[in-house]
Image (cartoon, coloured by chain):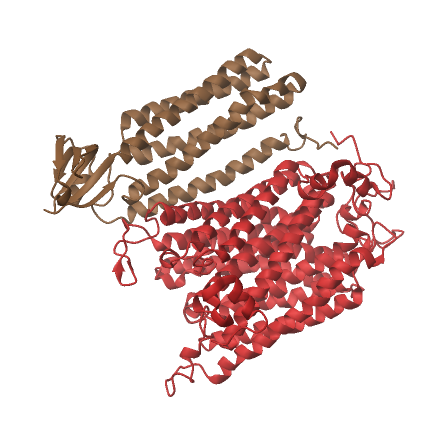
Amino acid sequence: MQATTYAPHHAHAHEAHHADQGFWRTYIFSTDHKVIGIQYGLTALCFLLFGFFLMLMMRWQIAHPGEAVPLVGPLLNALLGDVAAKGIMSPDLYNSFGAMHGTIMVFLAIVPLAVGAYGNYLVPLQIGANDMAFPKLNMMSYQVYFLGGIIMFVSFFIPGGAAQSGWTSYPPLSMAVPTDGQTFWLIGMVFLITSSLLGSVNILATIIQLRAPGLTWMRLPFFVWAQFTASFLLLLAFPPLEAAGVMQLMDKVAGTSFFLPTGLAVGGNLANVSGGGSPLLWQHLFWFLAHPEVYVLILPAMGIIAEIIANNTRKPLWGYRSLVYGALAIGFISFLVWAHHMYLTGMGTKIATFFQTTTMIISIPSVIILTCLLISLWGGSIRFNTPMLFALAFLPMFGIGGLTGLPLGFSVSDIHLHDTYYVIGHFHYVVAPGTIFALFAGIYFWFPKLTGRRMSEYWGKVHFWGSLLFMNLVFMPMFIQGMAGMLRRMSDGAVQYSELKLQGVSGALSSTVIGLNNFILWGAVGLALAQIPFIINLFWSIKHGEEVHSDNPWEATTLDWQTPTPPPHGNFLTPPSVYRGPYEYSVPGAARDFVPQNEPQKKA
Amino acid sequence: MEIPYTVQARPDTGVYNAKVGMWLFLASEVMLFGGLFSSYILLRVSALEGTWPTGLLSVPLGTINTIILALSAITTLLAWVACKARMFDRFKLFQGLTILLAIIFLGIKSYEYRDKFTHYELVLKSGEIADGHLVRREANGDVVLHGHTVKEHAELMNGRKHVEHRELTIPKDQIVRMQNYGPWHNTFLATYFTMSGLHALHILGGIVVMGYLWGPGSRMWKTDPERFTNRVEVSGLFWHFVDLVWIFLFPTFYLI
């Protein structure tokens, strides 16, 4: 029961198909998984840059509180009005930028890039399918995501501005802040969650149903397993947050009190609510999603890294089965750890012990995966190209992110570190030099398949070394600030708790700790500059990059490289069959140092 | 370009694509309603003494609606069986009946909602509470209720206790606070309206999909009956899930 018709193969098959359907059906309302993947990718990269700019402005405010933001200050004032009077960021504006930075980075940038773009583009190719299982649904999930993004973006410009209560939106604070931005945030989230649900159903059904003949579960590339697990997490962890989002929306627009306790006072007055709700209920529902979400961010990244490491060490991944079972174990256990974000809520020691135990247990499969990837390097003749550099940097960077998480997993140490810059440093090491490096690696790696050209290696390396250096300059000092007790989410960069304001008070933050704010600012500026070569390289190489003369320029084994370049509508010229595992590199006795999955076994 | 296994089952998994998709979607729906039911439990066990009303909803109406949905579960199954047996007229009949039953369910549900929205609680200057259905508002602002008055708010929490209702006229200047039994009134009603409302949206979605398959979508019967039968089966799976949610909603809100 394979597909019967395939696009003809000639150099312009892609363009020919485009001409058939016209601009709108080809680029905007396309049902082709590759076009949708690129749509996700470009939209998410724009949001990634936007989220980064928000943070850049905030870093200025933290280092120079009360001083006008350079360059963009007048623009902020013109666009947003009094909250940025004279170009100075008000605390309210700082709060909305902070809340939206988190929301945009997690829900509009990283997840859509890791799952929406990579999952959509690569999963059907790697499993030898001609498209996703439900192409129309696929188109819809992108559109719903885009709409959710628009709603979030528009909320900056309404009176009162965007949501101000952190990406976590804890009530009652989120109810008390006088802006409709929170309502926009909730409606936007319902859209984004719906999009994620549709997308994950599609990816799962595709992996279950459309694997090419011979592609058994244990022959799947690890990337596909990572997407499979991440999609299951999205499918099962997101709905409780959707329920919570609906309830908070009801609190906001229908006057219910799901999360508002009896006797709640706002601004010194008793709030006019029926009461009886529970603010803690929101935290439970939020973290029930948001912890598995962390693994949605990291698993696809590990999948990308695994592909690139196997390809550039020219040897099979070490411990393929351990990787697969590790990913599945992470997926399962991630549902049992959420309350380690809530040690400060006064939970009983028995409950805290349970969540400390599960948190320690989940670190085991993470370490197994990282160790497998590390050992895979052993004895390889490594090709140090740009994707491989990013992949290699991922390992220690994610390692730092993971290990600094352990003190947060124990309630004793977490009580000191909770809500400090230590936490910010920890999860940014996981996501920024961790996941984002993996996403960069993937872009450099699969660019030749998308365009038939390579990105510049030289500028790729400039981008890599700049990013690696400045990422660490930005995030490493945060551990020091956090351990010194500097709290997050403070629009004055904690000056009010420093020696500058509290002379002779024991425990006041030293001027060294405060001084690191300026250090981080310039690290962030450097990080911004380091992205310029990437952006130019990305667009310039589409037309002017070095042309590749093979459909498989990296000499890879997986099916995504056994297609024409770029893959036409329908992907494969003939339905592929799979005869071997995903990483048959340097097989003794083979003619070349790689054997593609679709190459038949020789009769003995 | 054709995607495999849209009609025939894949041999090693034993199902066609849409069925896998629907089961996965239903798994996420279980988590959605699971989150809501968990919230209900948490809010109810942490409610202060005398703030959680019981017996506020009409058990007879709830029972009738339960029976209606149970019947529609049977008719939706028979509609699929008729497709399998290639009897198009019987499919039309049973699919039509399912949609009709679903619409009756929503009709009864709206009647119940209206009953709550016209039910008022008035806190009076004397400290007493007048509670009952709004009969009319006089031109001078006085309020006429069909209900009763109580001394303590907690007395209103048992809806099953029989109390004499009579027509009360409450002068405008006696009213401190007047609020109807909407979702804003208390946490019980908040959970009731949110969860039954979300369920009603699912019913509405079911009506749209099954109506499409009954009407314009049934043209596929002539071209690809096997695929059409699959569509009926998948929409039936969804419908059974919606019924199942109600089986949990009914005791939760009406009985306990």
Extreme residue toward the front, this view: B139
User: Is residue A224 among the parts visible in the rendering?
Assistant: no
Quick check: A173 above or below B191? below
**Picture residue at 60% right of the left edge, 57% below the top:** A47
Viewer-closest of A319 and B42 = B42
Chain A image colour: red
User: Is residue A28 among the parts visible in the rendering?
Assistant: yes
Quick check: A272 above or below A478? above
Judged left or right of residue B105, residue A66 is right
Residue A70 locus on image (x, y percent): 57, 74
Quick check: A492 above or below A350? below
Viewer-closest of A179 and A446 = A179
Chain brown in the figure, letter: B
- What is the number of callouts on the image? 0
Residue A346 locus on image (x, y percent): 34, 62
| Quadrant of image for the C terminus of chain A | top right
Q: Give the quadrant of residue B132.
A: top left
Residue A591 locus on image (x, y percent): 90, 51
Judged left or right of residue A338, residue B193 is left
Quick check: A493 above or below A433? below
| Quadrant of image for the N terminus of chain A | top right
